[in-house]
């Protein structure tokens, strides 16, 4: 049976690094963030339209389904529809109804939700929205997960600490 794990966190909280490391250790695949490459190619004045954000969420879920066929017991997902929905709220003060539906339903897709803390240095690259937004996004994630009683773990510290924390939960280690 396939276990799907989604990694959440504000920009530059180590989600991709953690997925990459865990995939290597677990000898499985990870689903990269479709929206990052899409944004680099299609953004206009650092923004995407609500329709483009819906497209990103739809393709991300399709990628999960496609990568699941290659996974070795565990599928690591770098993001999900919730994150795309949050970007829509942030940049457009709302989201298309279909994106909202996807964001609220996406939690059923995962056995484990991992929130990556923002306790690592911010990688200030041009495509990111700034360190100030990182804290705002992270607080939104914390409050949403708690407010909607979504079971999750929080990982922090070094990559090694984060990897070990996920492996401890995944493999039942203490």
Image: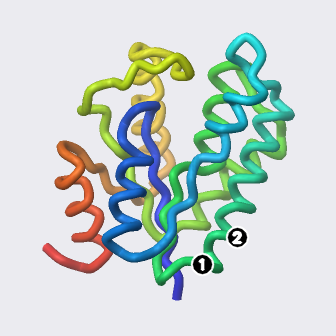
Residue farthest toward the bottom in the current orientation of the protein: 1
Q: Position of residue 172 (x, y in %)?
A: 24, 79
Residue farthest toward the left in the current orientation of the protein: 174
Locate the C terminus by quadrant: bottom left
- The residue that mark 2 highlights is 66
Q: Residue at x 43, y 65 (%)?
A: 112
Q: Position of residue 63 (x, y in %)?
A: 69, 61
| Horizontal relation, residue 47 to residue 118: left or right | right
- The residue that mark 1 highlights is 70
Please say if 120 is above or below 68.
above
Q: Residues within 10 Å of mark 2 (few under 14, many from 20)?
A: few
CB under 8 Å between callouts 2 and 1? yes
Please say if 29 is above or below 136.
below
Q: Residue at x 31, y 33 (%)?
A: 118
| Label 2, label 1: how far apart the Cα atoms are | 8 Å
Q: Residue at x 37, y 48 (%)?
A: 17
Please say if 107 is above or below 134.
below
Q: Residue at x 72, y 47 (%)?
A: 57
Q: How many marks?
A: 2
Q: 168 and 12: which one is in front?
A: 12
Task: Give the secondary structure at mark 1.
Answer: loop
In the picture, the disc for residue 120 is: none
Q: Residues within 10 Å of mark 1 (few under 14, many from 20)?
A: few
Task: Give the secondary structure at mark 2.
Answer: helix
| Horizontal relation, residue 130 to residue 42: left or right | left
Instruction: Name the colouring of the figure.
Output: rainbow
| Horizontal relation, residue 128 to residue 34: left or right | left
Q: 24 and 55: which one is in front?
A: 24
Q: 61 and 32: which one is in front?
A: 32
Q: Position of residue 107 (x, y in %)?
A: 58, 59
């Amino acid at each position: 049976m396939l276990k799907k794990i989604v990694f959440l966190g504000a920009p530059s909280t180590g989600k991709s690094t953690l997925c990459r490391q865990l995939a290597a250790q677990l000898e499985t695949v990870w689903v990269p963030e479709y929206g990052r490459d899409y944004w680099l190619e299609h953004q206009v004045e650092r923004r995407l339209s609500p329709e483009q954000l819906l497209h990103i969420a739809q393709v991300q879920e399709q990628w999960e389904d496609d990568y699941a066929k290659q996974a070795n017991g565990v599928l690591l997902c770098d993001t999900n529809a919730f994150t795309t929905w949050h970007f829509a709220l942030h940049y457009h003060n709302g989201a298309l109804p279909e994106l909202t539906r996807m964001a609220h339903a996406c939690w059923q897709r995962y056995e484990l939700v991992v929130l990556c803390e923002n306790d690592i240095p911010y990688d200030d690259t041009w495509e990111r929205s700034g360190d100030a937004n990182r804290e705002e996004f992270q607080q939104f994630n914390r409050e949403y997960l708690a407010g909607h009683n979504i079971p999750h773990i929080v990982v922090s510290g070094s990559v090694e600490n984060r990897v070990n924390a996920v492996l401890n939960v995944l493999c039942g280690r203490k």
